[in-house]
């Protein structure tokens, strides 16, 4: 991944080539008047939605800004439950996975990621149907730091959920909480992975 300095350099080079000022690029990208100025001088971790709008206004692929040719595979749906196809070979190059839909890698997020598409409304208003969440799954089981966080959760009966992961009242069991649905109490969980990044539906 490119660092923020490389992202800024790519934007400034494209601005010069196409004759944009900071203000005019902000307007062309349908962003606030100071958005490009802040991106070039203040913001150290810009959102993928902002970068996508800037890239579109500059008529260039967003990957040229992030400096990454790799895309992240969308491995399935998450929400009310759904089958998810996981990588079985950790050495598979994501860029070669033509059988999966892919989405841009979030800026400044390193490591091997997978993306899941949110379905249903049980996590409104935090997550909407059609949002893309990004997680990194590099081990089975649950780490204590995952408790009380929004996580992608894989249950022992092979359900896949986007829930707030909480400790259960029984040993080695967990309660999965939603914002608009009843809790799933004392569930056996195979693994969980905290949400690292979300791409809103309108940005996809």
Image (tube, helix red, strand yellow):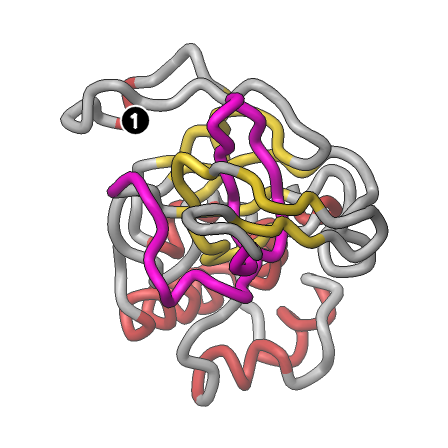
Taking the view exactly as shown, the residue that stands out farthest to the bottom is 42
Quadrant for residue 80, please give it.
Answer: top right
Provide residue 161's location: percent of width, then percent of height. 61, 38
- How many numbered tags mark residues here? 1
| Residue appearing at x 61%, y 28% in the figure | 77
- Residue at the far left in the pictured view: 91
Q: Nearer the viewer, residue 166 or 20?
A: 166
Q: Is residue 31 magenta?
A: no
Q: Secondary structure at mark 1?
A: helix
Residue 160 shown in magenta: yes
Residue 117, image x, y percentages: 62, 34
59 vs 91, left or right, is: right
Residues drawn in magenta: 139-168
Q: Is residue 1 found left or right of 171 in the rendered image?
A: left
Up the image or down, 99 lies above or below 125; here it is above
Quadrant, the C terminus: top right
Q: What's the residue at 77%, 40% (across, down)? A: 129
According to the picture, the residue beneath numbered tag 1 turns out to be 95
Q: Is residue 176 above or below residue 18?
A: above
Residue at 73% in and 78% down: 32
Is residue 58 or residue 164 the one in the foreground? 164
Q: Is residue 80 left or right of residue 38?
A: right
Q: Say which quadrant the N terminus sits in.
A: bottom left
Q: In the image shown, does 145 or 3 lie closer to the viewer?
A: 145
Q: Residue furthest front?
A: 170
Q: Nearer the viewer, residue 156 or 47?
A: 156
- Residue shown at 74% from the left, 49% from the top: 183
Q: Position of residue 167 (x, y in %)?
A: 52, 59
Residue 34 % position (x, y): 65, 85
């Amino acid at each position: 991944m490119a660092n923020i300095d490389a992202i800024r350099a790519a934007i400034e080079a494209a601005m010069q080539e196409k004759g944009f000022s900071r203000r005019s690029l902000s307007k062309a990208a349908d962003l606030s008047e100071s958005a490009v100025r802040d991106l070039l001088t203040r913001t150290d971790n810009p959102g993928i939605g902002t970068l996508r709008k800037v890239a579109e206004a500059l008529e260039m692929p967003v990957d040229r800004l992030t400096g990454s040719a790799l895309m992240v595979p969308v491995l399935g749906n998450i929400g009310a439950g759904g089958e998810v196809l996981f990588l079985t070979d950790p050495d598979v190059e994501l860029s070669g996975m033509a059988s999966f839909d892919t989405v841009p890698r979030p800026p400044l997020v390193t490591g091997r990621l997978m993306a899941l598409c949110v379905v249903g409304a049980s996590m409104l208003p935090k997550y909407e149907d059609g949002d893309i969440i990004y997680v990194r799954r590099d081990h089975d089981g649950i780490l204590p730091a995952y408790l009380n966080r929004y996580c992608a959760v894989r249950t022992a009966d092979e359900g896949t959920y986007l829930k707030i992961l909480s400790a259960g009242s029984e040993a080695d069991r967990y309660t999965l909480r939603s914002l608009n649905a009843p809790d799933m109490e004392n569930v056996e969980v195979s693994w969980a992975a905290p949400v690292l990044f979300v791409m809103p539906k309108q940005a996809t």
